[in-house]
Image (spheres, rainbow, N blue to C red):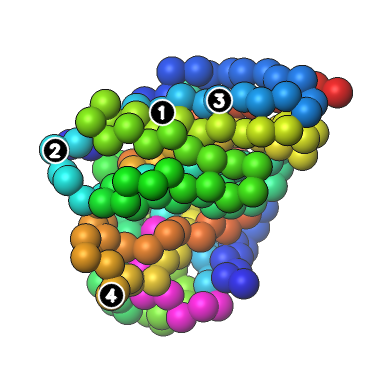
């Protein structure tokens, strides 16, 4: 069975600085998707970024980028120029066919 | 934009009551999902449906049932609510991807969640 591990329950960063959230996963599959979702306080969960495992190039979305290390089964999220609105729970997720697995989440606080 | 709505943001019920949580999506998505979210456990899949009247058990289906009579609507039912079902419930939907070589399903879009308290 696939598992997803986020080893950092809580993190904080100063506004305008860079922070990296860690995620590792375990699977025997070779083709799958990886996601980072953001859940702001009392608000809807939204997709931040996604990565197809068969693509070697790391995905980027504006200030958000990933470091995908397939051999190491690692999928970290880097947030550059952190903003107050980035304060949220961040969930790493793995998907293969109908099997979607989420990590326990990392609570990120951006401090002014 | 995809819109997934849930019937209630907050709900308080008593032990033994039958509880209905409704989810509606407006993008003609084929897949719909129900998760519960608990601190330190992330999201755990309760049930999912890949077509009308079709359903599959997730990781924690005990104590729950689902209904999908129409494509846009997916209901979660707690037959007899218990205090250990106090949680945040999230609905999601996704479009089957037919173009990827992996055959994997596409991105899931989430509703705002229903925070259920069972007293």
Along the viewing direction, whichever of A40 and A112 lies nearer the viewer: A112
- Kindly tell me whether residue B118 is visible in this rendering: no
In whole angstroms, how far apart are the C-alphas of marks 3 and 1?
A: 10 Å
Local SS, label 3: strand
Instruction: Please state which of the two labelled residues, at mark 2 or mark 3, is closer to the viewer.
Output: 3
In whole angstroms, how far apart are the C-alphas of marks 4 and 2?
A: 23 Å
Mark identifier at residue A28:
2
Q: Residues within 10 Å of mark 2 (few under 14, many from 20)?
A: few
- Kindly tell me whether residue A20 is visible in this rendering: yes
Along the viewing direction, whichever of A82 and A26 lies nearer the viewer: A82
In whole angstroms, how far apart are the C-alphas of marks 2 and 1?
A: 17 Å
Badge 2 and badge 1 in a common chain: yes
Badge 2 and badge 3 in a common chain: yes
Taking the image as shown, residue A29 lies to the left or right of residue B76, namely left
Q: Classify the position of the C terminus of chain A by image quarter.
A: top right
Span shown in magenta: B26-33
Chain for disc number 4: B
Where is residue B13, by image quadrant? Answer: top right
Q: Name the residue under label 1.
A: A23
Chain for disc number 1: A
Q: Residues within 10 Å of mark 1 (few under 14, many from 20)?
A: many
Q: Name the residue under label 3.
A: A20
Q: Name the residue under label 4.
A: B98
Instruction: Please state which of the two labelled residues, at mark 3 or mark 1, is closer to the viewer.
Output: 3
Along the viewing direction, whichever of B22 and B30 lies nearer the viewer: B30
Local SS, label 4: loop
| Residue B95 x/y as whole percent | 39, 71
Q: Is residue B27 magenta?
A: yes
């Amino acid at each position: 069975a696939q598992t997803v591990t986020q080893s950092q329950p809580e993190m904080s960063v100063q506004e305008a600085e860079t922070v990296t959230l860690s995620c590792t996963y375990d699977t025997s599959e070779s083709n799958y998707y990886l996601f980072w979702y953001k859940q702001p306080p009392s608000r809807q969960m939204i997709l931040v970024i996604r990565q197809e495992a068969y693509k070697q190039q790391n995905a980027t979305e504006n200030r958000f980028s990933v470091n995908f290390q397939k051999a190491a089964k690692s999928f970290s999220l880097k947030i550059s120029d952190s903003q107050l609105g980035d304060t949220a729970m961040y969930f790493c997720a793995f998907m293969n066919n109908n099997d979607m697995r989420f990590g326990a989440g990392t609570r990120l606080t951006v401090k002014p | 934009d995809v819109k997934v709505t849930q019937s209630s943001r907050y709900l308080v019920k008593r032990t033994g009551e039958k509880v209905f949580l409704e989810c509606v999506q407006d993008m003609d998505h084929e897949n719909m999902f129900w998760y519960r979210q608990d601190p330190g456990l992330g999201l755990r899949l309760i049930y999912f449906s890949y077509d009308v009247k079709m359903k599959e058990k997730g990781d924690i289906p005990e104590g729950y049932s689902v209904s999908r009579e129409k494509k846009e609507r997916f209901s979660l039912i707690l037959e007899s609510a218990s205090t250990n079902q106090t949680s945040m419930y999230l609905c999601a939907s996704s479009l089957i991807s037919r173009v990827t070589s992996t055959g994997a399903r596409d991105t899931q879009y989430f509703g705002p969640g229903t925070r259920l308290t069972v007293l």
